[in-house]
Amino acid sequence: MLKVRSLHKTYGDLEVVRGVSFEVAAGECYGLLGPNGAGKTTTLRCCLGLTAPDSGEIVLGALPVPARAREARAHIGVVPQFDNLDPDFTVRENLRMYGRYFGMSRAQVEARVPWLLEYAGLIDKADAPIDALSGGMKRRLTIARALVNDPRVLFLDEPTTGLDPQARHVVWQRLKRLLGEGRTIILTTHFMDEAQRLCDRVAIMDHGVFLAEAPPHDLIEREIEPVVIEVYGDGVGAWFDAHAQRLATRAELSGDTAFCYCQDPQPLLATLAGETELRVLRRAANLEDVFLKLTGRDLRD
């Protein structure tokens, strides 16, 4: 559904996308992950024909982009990072108006709206003003609006940013339903648990290049030891110097927390048995560990 080959894009003296190549199969959820400034947004804008690349090849739904980007966009759905619903219209009217943007007839739109309201779980809110909706409701409506033209491909830019845990789980259920229908999703997110739950494959991007690309479980197995011990509290620095680097396969001290990556955690845990000032969390390795290993822990602007 999407093919990208040797994509390059430069702004001034800064090359923000440097030879990126990837493919997304029909029915797949593909995650594009990376810190701020990694090149994710520019890559997606090029794929949508909103930004012209300096070089490379993009084919979206069998149509070349940017040459036939307008035609390609007529058959996809886009969910922006921030909701841009029209506050002057009701829930139902927002869906009607958006359908007309795609050139759908009034009858086509009216036939589509009940399904969209059911999908968003907003049948009881159909005639409510936008300001009366919660953040989770607005997000579900934005996703439903992107489906008005019955697209086979969806681009989702951080779909659950700003939502509480309950609302996030509802959105995840709605997205899994779309995948179950055979739709294709290209997803950007800063929530690694979201990517791990939803994505068939993820690419971790930084400084304009892909650092890794694989199914989340494969990346975790390949890049990270199976057990992570987090230690924090008074005296963690002294404990880290005395034990962590010696007994862990790999260890990092970030602020007041030690992250210890282990094949066998028992020798390390034994040193913590009498440490009353230190708190310990033992957990399985996850996609966030991979992300931080590959892109670092430094804060990005």
Image (cartoon, helix red, strand yellow):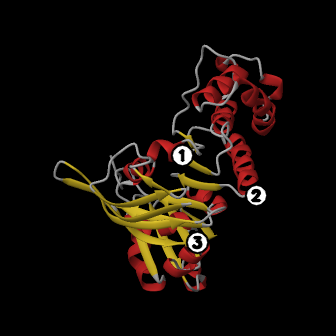
Say which residue label 3 marks: 215
Residue 236 visible from this viewpoint: no
Q: Nearer the viewer, mark 2 or mark 1?
A: 2
Name the quarter where the N terminus is drawn: bottom right
Q: Which residue is mark 2?
A: 180
Residue 61 seen: yes
Residue at the spot 35% in from the left edge and 45% down from the top edge: 51
Question: Quadrant of the rendered structure where residue 107 is?
Answer: top right
Furthest residue in direction left, as rendered: 13
Residue visible at 70% across and 40% down?
167
Label 2 close to label 3 by CB (< 8 Å): no
Query: Residue at (71%, 56%) from the top-left corner?
Result: 179
Front position in the image: 276 or 119: 119
Label 1 packing within 10 angstroms: few (<14), some (14-19), many (20+)? some
Q: Which mark is residue 158?
A: 1
Compare marks 3 and 1 and give the one earlier in the sequence. 1
Q: Residue 250 vs residue 217: left or right?
A: left
Looking at the rendered structure, the kind of residue marked 3 is Pro
